[in-house]
Amino acid sequence: MAKLGRAERQRLLQQRIRENPLQTDEELAHHFGVSVPTIRLDRFHLGIPELRLRSEGLARQAVRGLRAMGRQEMVGDLVDLELGRSGRSVMDTTPDMGFQRTGVLRGHYIFAQADSLALAVVDGDVVLTGLVNAKYKQPVVAGEQIWATAEVLRHVGSRWVVLVVSTVRDIPVFRAKFVVVALDRDKGGPGQ
């Protein structure tokens, strides 16, 4: 990245953190070609809290709207949720999640994160996955961070179609369309 003036760098820093609030100061420093203390000073001047406080605030906000499941049932950490519209989650994978011989992440972890996010964005008391059309686009190495983004494409009656795209370092690694069924307990759904 070309050398930027302080004002322009701070404007772009705000935009970058708005798009991905869980970036570390080290990642931001590398992106802007400046030192970590420079990024910290920029954050201080802009009133942007450190990563730990940003992630805690995002998680608290997102979980408030969650209806279909408890926070502890989510695979990955819910970062953003607009019930009935969209959501994002992040999952830090660990070496034990991969195949021992290759270090490649086992696919069911990627699927579980996407599935729980698809269920989380649907507005309903009881939410079930009915059908999935999924494609693994690229292997993920255990230890990498996966971002999943969900978007409601259609909603007709109790059926929702949710698109989930998972990325590692902005590279798509998984894509799936989920057909999700939402039932309300007070309207004759399961659990009555």
Image (tube, grey):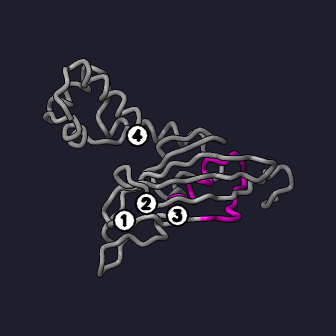
Residue 40 in the image: state x and y as whole percent: 20, 30
Q: Is residue 54 magenta?
A: no
Mark toward the start of the polypeptide (3 vs 2): 3
Q: Which residue is labeled 4 in the image? A: 56
Cα distance between the residues tagged 4 and 2? 26 Å
Density class for disc 1 (Cα within 10 Å; few <14, some 14-19, many ≥20) is many
Residue 108 in the image: state x and y as whole percent: 49, 70
At 69% from the left and 60% from the top, the residue drawn is 128
Cα distance between the residues tagged 3 and 2? 14 Å
Element class at badge 1: loop
Q: Nearer the viewer, mark 3 or mark 2?
A: 2
Q: Which residues are magenta?
A: 111-133
Mark toward the start of the polypeptide (4 vs 2): 4
At 31% from the left and 22% from the top, the residue drawn is 11
Q: Nearer the viewer, mark 1 or mark 3?
A: 1
Cα distance between the residues tagged 3 and 4? 22 Å
Element class at badge 2: strand
Question: Disc 1 marks which amino acid?
Answer: Val
Cα distance between the residues tagged 1 and 3? 14 Å
Residue 121 in the image: state x and y as whole percent: 62, 47
Question: Disc 4 marks which amino acid?
Answer: Glu
Density class for disc 4 (Cα within 10 Å; few <14, some 14-19, many ≥20) is few
Q: Are marks 1 and 2 in contact (CB under 8 Å)?
A: yes
Q: Which residue is labeled 1 in the image? A: 140
Mark toward the start of the polypeptide (4 vs 1): 4
Q: Does residue 103 appear left or right of residue 20 in this picture?
A: left
Question: Disc 3 marks which amino acid?
Answer: Ala
At 23% from the left and 39% from the top, the residue drawn is 31
Mark toward the start of the polypeptide (3 vs 4): 4
Q: Is residue 128 magenta?
A: yes
Q: Which residue is labeled 3 in the image? A: 112
